Structure formats: C-alpha cells, structure tokens
Amino acid sequence: MSKLDKTEVLSAFEAAYEAKNGKKPEIVAKSGWFSVDGGKNMRLADVAALTEELTSGSAPAAKKAKPAKKTKTTKAIAKPAKKGTFTVVKANEDGDKAEDLWIVILARKDHDCRLPRGVV
C-alpha cells in the first residue's frame, strides 16, 4: 500500500473535476474524511480512485439534484378542511380556569405551597 500525499491527490482531483464539470469542487476535510460538494464522505484513497475515473472519462457527471420520486396516484386525494389556529374548549362545570383551581386547592392545605410553574 503506497502512501498518498493529501495535497497532490486533492490538487489532481480538483483539476480533473474542473475539467469534467466546469467548476471547482467544494471539498470539506474533517478528520481524514473528505466531502465533495456536500456529498458522501470518503477517504483519501477513494478521492484518488475518483480522480482516476474522472480522468479516464468513465465516471458519470457530478451529482446533480436528486430526481423527483414518482408516486402512483389513481385518485385525487381530497384534503381535509383547514382548521383554525385554535380550538374552542368547553368550560368546566364550575367555570374556573386551571389557575383559579390550583389557588383553591393549595389554599385548602395546612401548609404554605407554591403554585405550579406557568401559573402566576
């Protein structure tokens, strides 16, 4: 196994990529892994292999946007009616809010208590 020089491999890859695609690649290096144009992470040996593929012309063009997935739809799906931003809740039997209820419950105790979080 031969030792690869990082600067040589990356410069050769940039030249081959630019010749094939017409633009410079965006290479992100992080702890021994290299990402080209936000793609899959690969090791330096994989970058060297990709350089050989680019120079030989057997590699496909750079990855473009992913093609849209085709879905099989036979019927038009009816969308449910849009609900409002809030729902009306029926008041409890006593007509008290949760805050008022907690104040009453804690006032009945023998010792001093605090209201729960979120209650003034």
Image (cartoon, rainbow, N blue to C red):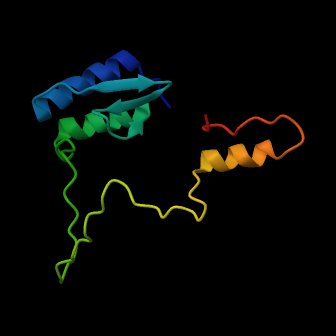
The x, y position of residue 98, in whole percent, is 61, 50
* Between 8 and 71, the one nearer to me in the picture: 71
Residue at 48% across, 26% down? 32
Residue at 30% across, 58% down? 84
Can you tell which quarter of the image residue 9 is in?
Answer: top left
Give the residue at the far front of this rendering.
94
Q: Tell me: 34 left or right of 63.
A: right
Question: Is residue 38 depicted above or below 58 in this figure?
Answer: above
* Between 81 and 111, the one nearer to me in the picture: 111
Looking at the rendering, in which quadrant would you find the C terminus?
top right
Residue at 41% across, 33% down? 45
The x, y position of residue 64, in whole percent, is 18, 45
Question: Is residue 5 depicted above or below 66 in this figure?
Answer: above
Give the residue at the far right of this rendering.
110
Q: Tell me: 105 left or right of 9.
A: right
Q: Tell me: 6 left or right of 100.
A: left
